[in-house]
Image (cartoon, grey):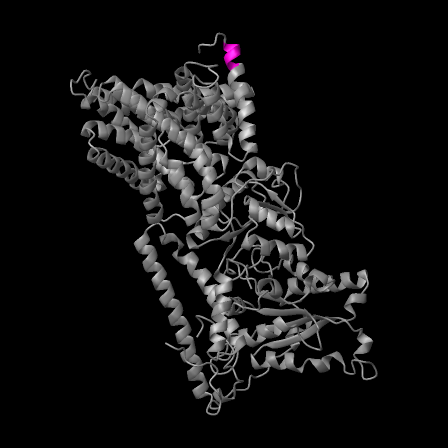
Amino acid sequence: MAHGSWLSSALIYLAAAVLAVPLARFLGLGSIIGYLGAGVLIGPWGLKLVTSPQAMLDFSEFGVVLMLFLVGLELDPRRLWSLRKPIFGWGSAQLFGSAALMTALAVSAGVDVALAGVAALGLAMSSTAIGLGVLHERSLMNTTSGQSVLSVSLLQDVAAIPILALLPLLTPAATRAAGGGWLGAAKALGVIAAIVLGGRLLIRPALRWIARSATPEIFTAASLLLVVATAALMQAVGLSMALGAFLAGVLLAESEYRRELETDLEPFKGLLLGLFFIAVGMSVDFAVVLAQPLRVAGVVAAFVLLKAFVLWAMGRAMPLPAPERPVFVILLAQGGEFGFVVFQTAAQSGVIAPSVASMLVAAVAISMLVTPLLLVAADRWLIPLLAGQTRRTLPELREPQNRSVIIAGFGRYGQIVGRMLYANGVQPTVLDIDAEQIEAMRKFGWRVFYGDATRLDLLRTAGAASAAVLVLAVDDVAQSIEIAKMVREHFPRLTIVARARNVRHYFELHDLGVGLIERETLDSALMSARSVLEQLGWERHQARTLAMRFRRHNVDQLHRIAPHRADEAKFIAASKQAREQLEQLFAQEREQAAQRRQTSGWSADDPAPAPPPAR
Amino acid sequence: MADAPFPTPVPADLGPSGAAARPGVVVLTAHPQMEHSRINRRLMTAAQQVTRRGAGVGVGVAVRDLYALYPDYLIDIAAEQALLASAELIVWQHPVQWYSMPALMKLWVDEVLSFGWAYGPGGTALRGKDLWLVATTGGPRESYHPDSYNRYDFNAFLPAYRQTAQLCGMRFLPPLVLYGAHRAGEPDVQAHLDHYTQRLASYPHWGELDTLLYDIVPPVPPDTRPDDTAALTPFGTN
């Protein structure tokens, strides 16, 4: 902090953020661009208000640590375990796929293999701060693409440890011994074990004790202390601070203080992340860029495009819904904080020359600058093309509501529910997060609020504490589960009437204690089945009765096969068996009816009530 | 057409004292507009609160609100038959509509009292039980008279009920009728409710019950059963 007192640098940072961020948002560019722009502006290459960004970068990196702690809080161990495949599978595919491609390209362009490998690994890392920050800003954390971004980021955090540890080994002169070796690994394992055990056994009673003191600022201090201590422990043994914080968050995800920790740390995280982005903006070394602009541009374009290619292929293979793919690709295609660290370490240990390192750092920083711009461009042009609509935000619901029904999600499903309610004089509070949809609905005279129903405070504002029924009709399965879980926990008297996208979703809701669940396509599909039977000659009333009985048995069977669903093979076998039983039951019945007609004597001239089913 | 996502448990709720005790009395109530009901709703509620003596611990009355259980007219035949099998007294409690029962009650009769179960060869499930009609009418007592608009005595509309009971081997107990239900004053209604619950509680110890004899059930030849080609066979009972 070259600029004298603490007060004046606070003045500079805060003023820059307060001016730049609203301006960027007003221009529709998002807050991250605002912070980055502010950083460039006040940095050594702008107004020169701050000349040594490195100190601020180190300090504000704690924002990333806090963010991962908060991400961890949202993921209880069970959900994390269910993410193991995306983390290790897709995460490794991204990191090593991108690194291999980049190495190959660099080597074919005549770069030394060791240099190419190190550079490729560093560039393959993405910015967790930008990725998760954008997901949070856009409430995308609980979408499929959001979870995929998180998975890949987590693997990068894990992989950073061995990469950083192995870097010195690449040094031709081996200037540094691979310090400690086994001892270091043992220490690392010990610290992780300490965090896991401490998180499970010590922290919760400690938090309970602190909460009983009923001093809010001390609870906030304890929350911060928890994260700082975890980070310090991890750093002491050379592990990723962010990873440690994430681990601590996961361990506390099931504690009763989860929400309090979240609310307390949220503002710190926001401010520190902002500072971090400002610091990234400041640290772009424009001297390097200006010295060889074409080379830097070429490196940025090559590595971002290569990573984007790998990510796009992953998005197709997963598969991600087409409109979500651009966000997934863009959020992971840039270089990241780990890149900075990797290049610095590599330069220190002599694996790569300092000039190359600073060029690579500049390339990473530029790619981080470009990411939000790419996102804006994708929002404007690419995603509408893929989804036929744009995604924007509107002012959020603020005035407390007190209607007896809340509808979360006013798409195809929620609308029908809402219309039926309105037709009967029930006026629900309607929430949706799709700005386009809301504006379209408002044009038709609907009263729809913009609001993310996965957020506790927003549900409270919507009147969840006093309402009788919540219609859970959001499109996204993960969000639906999240809301159901939160409502069961915080508003146990609020009855949930849920839409299930599929059977798995149905089971998950059922497990959460939701009693009134409808599979979204079941009834309309049965109506179509009725039409088919009618077209084949069944009487209309019989078709109706058969459809309704099919429905009852189908729901019965759903509950019977439910216990087997953890084991996929068993689940498939049970489902198959259930279907066969149902078919047998109906066939047996047709046969019995036919027999009775024969024995009852008056069937001879009776027209058959139903033709045999066409095969 | 979405009915309750979780199917009605089988056998259905057996009163407040739990499923283990057999209630002995099953009340089937049917009112297509229960929300507008003055009398039938109170009759139903009163029946739900009856505790019957003499069955060891207090045993309730199983009350089946048909329009609430089967809003989509998809009757769970197996569940209904299982419950009937456990009953000694079956009560049909409903408003009289067009000199007969509400549509869902009639569907219940059509589907649950099936050939080979309630009547006909092997159809002895209901033998020796009692059937009691508890009805309300819109018209006052005077209207059920040759000189008034309903033209017939109320009993003249009951042969179908009587014969249904008879064919199943049940006694048809003297009906309990509240005439002019929507004009009945509170004292009359209260007296009616008291009489009803007292009867439910004290069954089978009614004074006149011993004088009522079971008719001999005439055999039904297998080929004279009504056309059931459109009717349903309950799952699991045939």
Measured as percent of width and height from the top left, residue A67 is found at 44, 28
Farthest residue to the top: give it: A4
Which quadrant would residue A397 be assigned to in this image? Answer: top right
Which quadrant would residue B147 be assigned to in this image? Answer: bottom right
Measured as percent of width and height from the top left, residue A87 is found at 33, 38
Which image quarter is the N terminus of chain A in? Answer: top left
Looking at the image, which residue is at 32% across and 59% down? A573
A1 sits to left or right of B17: left
A245 sits to left or right of B29: left
A27 above or below A493? above
A481 sits to left or right of A306: right
Measured as percent of width and height from the top left, residue A249 is found at 41, 29
A91 sits to left or right of A181: right
Which region shows up in magenta?
Answer: A6-10
Which quadrant would residue B14 be assigned to in this image? Answer: bottom right
Q: Look at the image and say whether residue A418 sits in the magenta stretch.
A: no
Measured as percent of width and height from the top left, residue A411 is found at 55, 52
Which image quarter is the C terminus of chain A in? Answer: bottom left
B38 above or below A280? below
Q: Nearer the viewer, residue A94 or B172?
A: A94
